[in-house]
Amino acid sequence: MPATEYDALKFHDGMVKAGLIVPVGVPGIFGRNHVFEDVLARFDAAVTRLATDDRADFFVFPPTIERRILEKVGYMDSFPQLAGTVHSFFGKELDARKLSERIHAGGAWGDAMAITDVSLNPAACYPLYPTLPGTVPSGGRVVTMLNWVFRHEPSPEPTRMQAFRVREYVACGPPEMVIRWRDTWLERGKHLLESLGLPAKADVASDPFFGKGGKMLAASQRELKLKFEVLVPVISRENPTACCSFNYHEAKFTDAFGIALPDGETAHTACLGFGLERCVMALFQEHGFDPGTWPGAVREKLWP
């Protein structure tokens, strides 16, 4: 039985009342308690077990990346509304005193800061591409990461977070290899969520490209079936939430960073990502706020 009605605010308030999340005053930003984090770690471990055959190299990257990456991959052309560039103070002592006075007077002070060389990471796979060698093996390579992601879309809807974690896998190699890998993972991801008692379904999707031109890019992305999502009802039955996505980038990133195959042909990439907080919320909505009462089959899967 669902924990609450399929309503964003009721679900948010239900998680707050259960102590699972802790509001901190900014929409889309909240703390998580030990129960939430335990379920998240258990789900992440289930994904890791599912990926054993991939023999993926594991990396951890910080939540900031070099701003140049956004520029090289055209992120600001497509998603400027989501970017979180990092700004800092570069002034001298007199400027610092003026800044302090403006803050204490309740005035605006953003114009006293200047952009730095780093940005908050807007996609879990972005830190990886500049680190890949110029040549990848002919059979391809798979890498996995657990990264924090930031997207500037503040909302009271609990699944629409500004900061969240993604378990990401990236395949880099020949086109046929990465497409086959992506399609295999689409089935794996859907099956994993279904095995946890979630009513998951897969569908073609598109990214939130900016502006009028973005509508054309989104339509093209759908037509070419470059992006799929697995959807689960969390705050709405009619409009289920994307809990994991599966994307074929073609040569977008390998062209940008000069990544090739041994024969000199440009490598292609694909990625998949499980939005860990969203998957945890889907479990709480479907099975209730107390994991101790969840169905035995679900507990056996997460607490083997």
Image (cartoon, rainbow, N blue to C red):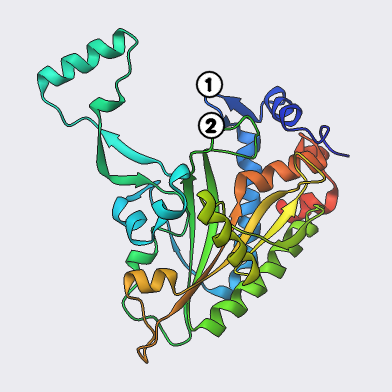
Q: Is residue 108 left or right of residue 242?
A: left
Q: Where is residue 191 in the image (x, y as percent from the top left)?
A: 76, 64
Q: In this view, does 93 lie to the left or right of 254?
A: left
Q: Is residue 177 above or below residue 190?
A: below
Are the residues flagged by discs 2 and 1 in contact, CB closer than 8 Å?
yes
Q: Considering the image in quadrants, where does the N terminus appear?
A: top right
Q: Label 2 amino acid?
A: Ile
Q: Is residue 24 above or below residue 97?
A: below
Q: Which residue is drawn at 83% across and 33% down?
A: 5
Res. 179 image quadrant: bottom right
Numbered tag placed on residue 25 in the rendering: 1
Point out the residue furthest to the bottom here.
263
In front of the other: 159 or 14 = 159
Q: Is residue 96 visible?
A: yes
Q: Is mark 2 on a helix, strand or loop?
A: loop
Res. 267 image quadrant: bottom left
Q: Residue at x 34, y 10 (%)?
A: 106
Res. 12 image quadrant: top right
